[in-house]
Amino acid sequence: MTELEEKLKAKIPGADTGIEVKRSICAICSPSHHCGLNCYVKDGTIIRVEGDPDHPYSHGKLCTKGSATRSYVYRKDRIRTPMRRIGERGEGKFEPISWDEAYQLIAQGLNRVKTEYSPHSVAFFSGYSKWYRPIYQRFAHVFGSVNFGTDDSVCAVAMKMGDNLTTGGGAAPDMAHSNTFLGWNFDGYYSEHLSIEGVQKLKARGGKVIIIDIRKTPAAKNLADIFLQIRPGTDGALALGMAKLIIDNGWADMDYVERYTYGFDQYKELAGQYPLEKVSEITGLRAEDIYEAAKVFATNGPACTNFSASALVHRINGFNTHRSIVCLMALTGNYDRVGGNYPVPATYLRQPAGFSTRDELFRNERYPKDGPERIGAQRFPLWESSFNEFQAMDLLRTLEEGTPYPVKAIFALGMNAKMFPETERLLEAMKEHLDFFVDVDVFMTRAAAYADIVLPACTSVERSELKCYRGGYLYYTRPVIEPLYESKSDVDILCELAKAMDLDDDLLKSGYEACLDWMIEGCGITMAELKESGRPMLVPTAKWPVKPGSCLENGFRTPTGKIEFYATAVAAIDPKYGLDPLPSYRDSLEDQNDPDTKADYPFYLCTGARVAYSIHSRSQRTPWLRSMCPVPTCEINQEDARRLDIANGDQVTISSPYGSIRMRAHVTGKTLAGVVLAQHGYTEANVNSLLGRDHLDPYTGFPGYKGMRCNISKYEGG
Ligand SMILES: Nc1nc2c(c(=O)[nH]1)N[C@H]1C(S)=C(S)[C@@H](COP(=O)(O)OP(=O)(O)OC[C@H]3O[C@@H](n4cnc5c(=O)[nH]c(N)nc54)[C@H](O)[C@@H]3O)O[C@H]1N2
Ligand SMILES: Nc1nc2c(c(=O)[nH]1)N[C@H]1C(S)=C(S)[C@@H](COP(=O)(O)OP(=O)(O)OC[C@H]3O[C@@H](n4cnc5c(=O)[nH]c(N)nc54)[C@H](O)[C@@H]3O)O[C@H]1N2
Ligand SMILES: [Mo]
């Protein structure tokens, strides 16, 4: 081999090899992170990726999914051109059309529904991707619809609502100054790898780590001083039981409670109903372990905790469970204190970076103020009054029943139908009741097959995107390769469509960068500078780190100005909805506990706990990621497996009152007896088809993804 051939084989950048390293970010995963990505590009193709060591936030780290970027970007099922449906909805028969034709057809289709029904009969929906949302939400409102909704209907917002209504806002752990970390449903190894280092450092300093999880996770194994393997969905009872212990043993910070909180007496009375033995029985934990955890948490302070976007709030008792954990922070005086949890205001796309932008104003200033209530408002009034999107878990009912007004068109960016409970019924309802459906996605999906018009979006390495990062950074990424095929960036699609439809908004019509310039005005940096630099830039107005104590000094942003054990905003909701202003506990299977259902479906099904090789539906057909778990697999405890004659690797049927799916059994000692754990996102084994559409948390509308009844048996079909 010549020297050049060797260098080419080793993918060494240089003028001789023609390989150039271009910087971008990995946007496959959680928007809280988006690690820096170095792409090695030769002849317009990415031939290698690695973490960007100079990235000020991720410092060269990259997880499994980011490492699979090439496998993701170059997938065979990329949508290549705009397409018009020529077969039946769902059949998947399309013909290519030009972009101009597509824009004309979309303009006609949406305007027809607007004229025949109303602009609100067009629902604008987005799946998991967040980066384009300011542009998208404004687009929906300028079009005239109140109905903008996203995966926020099932992700993070239930937690944020709990935070907002209790303390006035979310709060980050001050890990660097803490003595105890309460990792409540925390497994950062899989869900946010960049969060692990802080916990490791705390431990190295001699701090204590408590992990509360339903399964033995890497966090439990590597980090925990105390590990509580709790029965799923019973955390609310544990939090109240801990509160009782803390109050009874004099471990509460009563000075803090008196000065900064509201409703303590009622909270104390509620907690009083959870003595240790009762909590032990509900949670399946040993009384001495609960006592020890409560003691360490309350007496080895300051203590901080993580707030999970997913695990606890994916249950019908989720909102109050989350609130009960926030209340523990207040009870021990750990909220807004050094070493505890403290508010860090959002900068851009709801991520904090220590300065302000106008993205929320950009999103909302054109909201049609005379419009009706949004989809889901009548069923979930607390959601409606707390959050500026429709509750997508009411979409199926709205389509079927047409009340309070019909939904006749959906315009979607990345709609994954499998995110919705009773997926097949949703697709049926879309087929039957929609006059017009547009889906913009990177890949061809089940939902896209039902669309009238399908448009190809490109991935993050093919376009630009604005990101903020903790530490005070703004970053405007530059494309490292040209968009593949005829794909385009979502924001370009939206801005071009705004022009084609001649929407009444000069900003949208002037394009993404002009909109960004408007949003970041006043922060001390311009888009021109960001573009020129091509790197994350320190924003002059940024103040980082944000300091704890602002609420203690200036009051909390709640109706009483205090931390509300008793949530006055919940008390303001019509009593007919039966919402409790206190963080009371109820069974996470309460609506499935009739004797027949219990007998037929004796197992607790918990879905979607994060794993390293998977992210929702978008990873399932990414070859490198799929190769790590080629067959949809569920975890079952070894005792249960023995009793049911299920061996490791056997095919099993998981069933619920709504349907059944087939998976492969992974028999393990890591999962509790009586529990089945399964991944979501698979087309051939869609766990959400097992979930009833009304199995929802009445406070937030969030689905019980992680708490429903099921049965499991060996599949005998060969
Ligand atoms: N059973 C169960 N279900 C769950 C969960 C669970 O734990 N258990 N978790 C829930 C949670 S927390 C969330 S956040 C949701 C995730 O919500 P989903 O919306 O289901 O997430 P994805 O499947 O990742 O992405 C949706 C679509 O966006 C497309 N896409 C990717 N990038 C882009 C882009 O740049 N532009 C466009 N236009 N499209 C793009 C993808 O191809 C995909 O089809 O799932 C929820 N579903
Ligand atoms: N690899 C990967 N990372 C992701 C995602 C992904 O799909 N894949 N999705 C991203 C998204 S959209 C979200 S919302 C976040 C969510 O991220 P997290 O909030 O971390 O959510 P999970 O991993 O679902 O749950 C965390 C832990 O809670 C445990 N758990 C489940 N039920 C219970 C319970 O009843 N009680 C207790 N105490 N613990 C329980 C699970 O076993 C798991 O170890 O992850 C983000 N990161
Ligand atoms: Mo999520």
Image (tube, grey):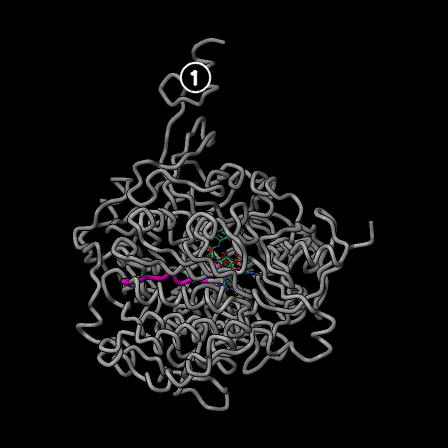
Q: Is residue 28 visible?
A: yes
Residue 386 location (% of width, % of height): 39, 76
Question: Seen from this angle, which residue lies furthest right?
Answer: 717
The residue sitting at the top extreme is 2
The image shows residue 708, relative to residue 1, as above or below, that is below
Report the amino acid beneath label 1: Lys
Magenta stretch: includes residue 477: no
Q: Nearer the viewer, residue 384 or 79?
A: 384
Q: As drawn, is 515 to the left or to the right of 419?
A: left
Please rate how many residues cluster around mark 1, counting C-alpha atoms within 10 Å: few if below 14, some from 14 to 19, many from 20: some
* Along the viewing direction, whichever of 245 and 56 lies nearer the viewer: 245
State which quadrant residue 433 falls in: bottom right
In depth, the one of 17 and 643 nearer the eye is 643
Q: Is residue 308 magenta?
A: yes
Residue sitting at x 73%, y 73%: 599
Q: What residue span does the magenta drawing correspond to?
A: 301-309
Q: Is residue 126 visible?
A: no
Q: Which residue is mark 1?
A: 7
Identify the residue at horizontal 28%, vertical 57% (top origin).
Answer: 178
Main SS of the magenta part reads loop
Res. 389 image quadrant: bottom left
Q: Estimate the x, y position of residue 173 in percent, counting from the top left.
A: 31, 59
Q: Is residue 175 above or below residue 261?
A: above
